[in-house]
Amino acid sequence: MHLDLTQERLAELTGIDRSTVQRIEYGGEAKISHLLLIARELRVHVSHLLS
């Protein structure tokens, strides 16, 4: 699935700071609450973000 979202747009949609979205994208530690928000916006199960 390709949603064509930028880090900035995903940050806006989830309410997460863009720098946090960037850190998560590049493999940094993430709060489960952030992962749940991102998974909901991307319409995937949170486990998909961890694989």
Image (cartoon, rainbow, N blue to C red):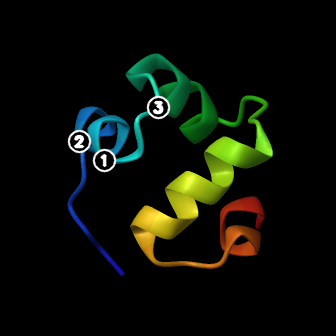
Q: Quadrant of residue 39?
A: bottom right
Foreground mark, 2 or 1?
1
What is the three-letter code of the residue carrying label 3? Ile
**Could you tell me which residue is drawn at 28 percent across and 37 percent down?**
12
Q: Secondary structure at mark 3?
A: loop
Residue nearer the viewer, 25 or 11: 11
State which tag comes first along the sequence, 2 or 3.
2
Q: Badge 2 is on which residue?
A: 9
| Outermost residue toward the top in this view | 19
**Could you tell me which residue is drawn at 76 percent across and 67 percent down?**
51
4 lies above or below 30:
below
Spatial CA span between label 2 and label 3: 10 Å
Q: Quadrant of the N terminus?
A: bottom left
Q: Which mark is residue 16?
A: 3
Q: Which mark is residue 13?
A: 1
What is the three-letter code of the residue carrying label 1? Leu
How dense is the environment of label 1, judged by Cα within 10 Å: few (below 14), some, or many (20 and up)? few
